[in-house]
DNA sequence: TAGATTGTTAATCGATTAACAATC
DNA sequence: TAGATTGTTAATCGATTAACAATC
């Protein structure tokens, strides 16, 4: 399923999607790349190029049918393909992610959680059961997730990553401030919240 | 304080920093750009160029003194300049961020929180007081933050952003899936957690 | 038809990589 | 000195923007 879209374009698709979904009403039945560009503060050719990857066809003079465009982006991003995910690390952040509804918009469901704190194991958080990290392998067999979210301390992240990859997880979203190493073919993305705030501060 | 470092290089500095801090011991007194590059899976010239922005001087044949390099990156990123931040939106994510210790590494301290839920107003979360959103202006006068974290629902994010900017906040880290508009000179960065997971899924 | 907008091709811009001189 | 590594200049690569033909 590897496509020839630049990653940077791929990253912008959710931005377009959010904007398009935020609109409604008859006056927004059609939308032009120019209007999107103005709203999001980017170039209109860039918008058209990005949208072209989703194979949605705009019509000269009128623009894109908003609902069709939404559908095309969602299809392209795989929002309609249901995917299971597991979460490792039920700390403050993990807890928040388990309760976060936003993943459903993209077709992902966090089905199980794992932690090594005996006080947490066996409990439920936002309706999801928390298992022991040792059961990670078994859990992955049980719910067959393609994705995993790592929200453990930095020191534990690589070993968790190894377990996940070994068990067959193909994509990992990592919140620990470490660069995870995984075999080729496994997609890893990192979100370092503190670093993001620091970057803002140093741009002022 | 606007410097001529490309934003993409700036984004990598915390990655180097985390890696360098993860090392210890006498055998890691010196480190070369090549070693960093291998560890992080990037080009060594890129590493040297990025590090050059922090004005840290490497020595031919030996490399960089690890502790000096850490100090130079931290200085460059402004980790030593203490900055106050406020958080708006004490939901699951906001709560997690209030309890997160990682911001301190970069010299930022979340000092106050704001929410519009009467049940939360007046409480403390991780030792930080929660005020009413209406008091945002007064709160900003009180603690003089340069930074703010927005963790409110998408529908409320823009109006919160407007309030923050009006009150003089210069940088905003936004977790709501909306593109915030702010006057020029205000730095806004967005973290869309769900979108990040979707991007991973669509890269598989 | 005229005008607005798309989609594409060519030009530009910026970031990465390659080559290499400097140096400890 | 020889060798390893830095820092910089030139070449390459990829992404954005500009120009423009196609079309509704």
Image (cartoon, coloured by chain):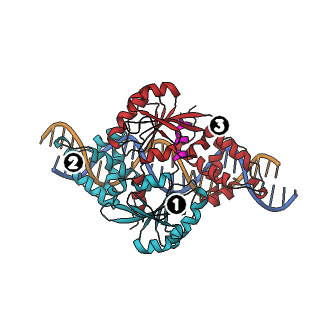
Chain colours: A cyan, B red, C orange, D blue
Q: Nearer the viewer, mark 1 or mark 2?
A: 1
Q: Is residue A7 at all visible to an observer of this figure?
A: yes
Q: Which residue, given by chain and number where applicable, does mark 3 sit on?
A: B80
Q: In front here: B115 or A172?
A: B115
Q: Chain of mark 3?
A: B
- Circle 2 crowding by C-alpha within 10 Å: few under 14, some 14–19, many from 20: few
The N terminus of chain B sits in image quarter: top right
- Identify the residue at image location x=21%, y=48%: A60
Q: Chain of mark 1?
A: A
* Residue B133 screen position, x and y as percent: 39, 32
Q: Which residue, given by chain and number where applicable, does mark 2 sit on?
A: A60
B84 lies left or right of A113: right
Q: Are marks 3 and 2 on the same chain?
A: no
- Identify the residue at image location x=58%, y=57%: A179
Q: Which residue, given by chain and number where applicable, does mark 1 sit on?
A: A119
Classified by dominant secondary structure, the portion drawn in magenta counts as helix
Q: Nearer the viewer, mark 3 or mark 2?
A: 3
Queried whether the magenta region covers residue B34, the answer comes back as no
Part of the protein shown in magenta: A188-203
């Amino acid at each position: 399923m590897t496509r020839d879209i630049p990653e940077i374009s791929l990253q912008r698709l959710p931005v377009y999607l959010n904007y398009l979904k935020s609109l409604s009403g008859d006056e927004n039945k059609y939308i032009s790349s120019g209007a999107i560009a103005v709203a999001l503060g980017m170039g209109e050719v860039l918008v058209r190029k990005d949208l072209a990857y989703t194979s949605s066809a705009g019509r000269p003079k009128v623009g894109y049918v908003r609902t069709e465009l939404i559908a095309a982006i969602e299809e392209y991003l795989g929002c309609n393909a249901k995917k299971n995910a597991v979460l490792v690390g039920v700390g403050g952040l993990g807890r928040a992610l388990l309760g976060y509804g936003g993943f459903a918009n993209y077709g992902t469901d966090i089905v199980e959680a794992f932690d090594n704190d005996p006080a947490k194991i066996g409990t439920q958080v936002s309706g999801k059961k928390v298992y022991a990290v040792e059961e990670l392998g078994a859990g992955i067999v049980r719910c067959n997730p393609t994705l995993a979210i790592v929200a453990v301390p930095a020191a534990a992240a690589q070993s968790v990553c190894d377990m996940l990859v070994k068990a067959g997880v193909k994509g990992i979203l990592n919140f620990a401030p470490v660069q995870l190493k995984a075999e080729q073919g496994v997609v890893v993305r990192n979100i370092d919240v503190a670093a993001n705030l620091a970057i803002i501060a140093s741009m002022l």
